[in-house]
Image (cartoon, helix red, strand yellow):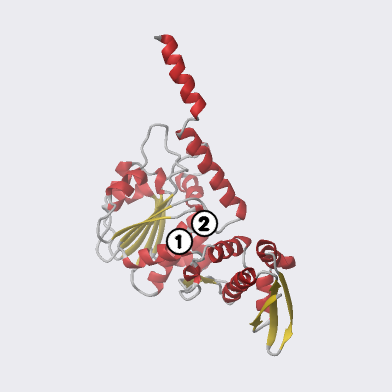
Amino acid sequence: MKQKTLLFETNEQTARVFGPFDENIRAIEKEFGVDVSNHPAEGGDAVSVSGADDEAVTMAAKVISFLRRMAEYEETISEQSVRYIIETVKSGNVAELSDFGDDCLCVTTRGRPIKAKTAGQKQYVEKIRKNTITLGVGPAGTGKTFLAVAMAVKALRDKQVSRIILTRPAIEAGEKLGYLPGDLQSKIDPYLRPLYDALYEMIGSENYARLHEKQTIEVAPLAYMRGRTLDDSFIILDEAQNATPEQMKMFLTRLGFNSKAVVTGDLTQTDLPRGQKSGLAQVVKLLDGIEDIAIHTFTERDVVRHRLVQKIILAYEKYDREQREPSQPNARYRKLRGVVKK
């Protein structure tokens, strides 16, 4: 019987790793076929991993070790984070996890540090840091917008820029703007709500109101960007898959001196009218390979929301592939039908 023991500094750290009702540990036990237990030790807790398979015990202990490190800066360790670490350790890509937790982008109003949670997110943050323009493309829940806003807040706090500008196309997704109550600003606000939510979490609603009044932070529809030159700014275009090629060109040419731009979007969730090309899809091809412009593609492994979001994304990807690639029987049927017509 193989056994490994890990020491935890506090009971709270142990509780975070084990998760509510020990669900994190149960997932590890089920995945590797091991038994995990904890008991008091001098200065904290001792967590023991035991099992018949030496390799399984070693991998399970590595997972718990990385979770222990995550518990130092995360109040709650999500099921998705546990699954990500398990899959990464099993695939042998442990190096991806080696520097997690070292880079704090900013701290929320509740004192929670914001950090990259996957290797893909880490690469995305590095690309934003090193390039003037970064395109972040990928499925929902990968942190594209949230991390970009965190980088913008960090740049503002570090006095690297003097203002933050957040924008997104006001494209209707099944509901007409005219049907919504209120004036133009009231009609537009629902489209910008995700940007407000991210800002409120990082700087608080009162600070946002103060900075917004001083025009240090601006949240506006994409159409309001026309004719402007944006100097000394951190600019984020969110939901860029809903921008037309003309709007995308207009936005990118607003970039001024000492500014940084991040463009985010999900090409599988375009709300443009049927037949209208997405400016994001076009610009990903046009700008590829240009110096100081980075393109980062997220995958379902970078999803940090509920585990079902990842499964939903995979289901839609499978459906899209089946639609693009007709089954062989259907192809044979069309061929035979063509022969009969002749």
In this rendered view, identify the residue nearer to me: 251 or 26: 26
In this rendered view, identify the residue nearer to me: 161 or 205: 161
Secondary element at image label 2: helix
Q: Would residue 70 appear left or right of 164 to someone viewing this image?
A: right
Residue 176 seen from this side:
no
Q: Which residue is mark 1?
A: 120
Mark 2 Cα-neighbour bin, 10 Å: few <14, some 14–19, many ≥20: some
Q: Mark on residue 212? A: none
Q: Residue at x 31, y 50 (%)?
A: 251
Q: Position of residue 166 (x, y in %)?
A: 40, 57
Q: Whole-Å distance between the Cαs marked 1 and 2? A: 8 Å
Q: Earlier in the sequence, mark 1 or mark 2?
A: 1
Q: Which residue is mark 2?
A: 301
Q: Is residue 159 above or below residue 78?
A: below
Q: Is residue 340 above or below residue 121?
A: above
Q: Position of residue 106 (x, y in %)?
A: 47, 72
Q: Residue at x 56, y 64 (%)?
A: 90
Q: Is residue 144 above or below residue 276?
A: below
Quarter of the image with the C terminus is top left
Q: Position of residue 41 (x, y in %)?
A: 72, 87
Residue furthest to the bottom in view is 42
Q: Amino acid at mark 2?
A: Arg
Q: Amino acid at mark 1?
A: Gly
In this rendered view, identify the residue nearer to me: 241 or 71: 71
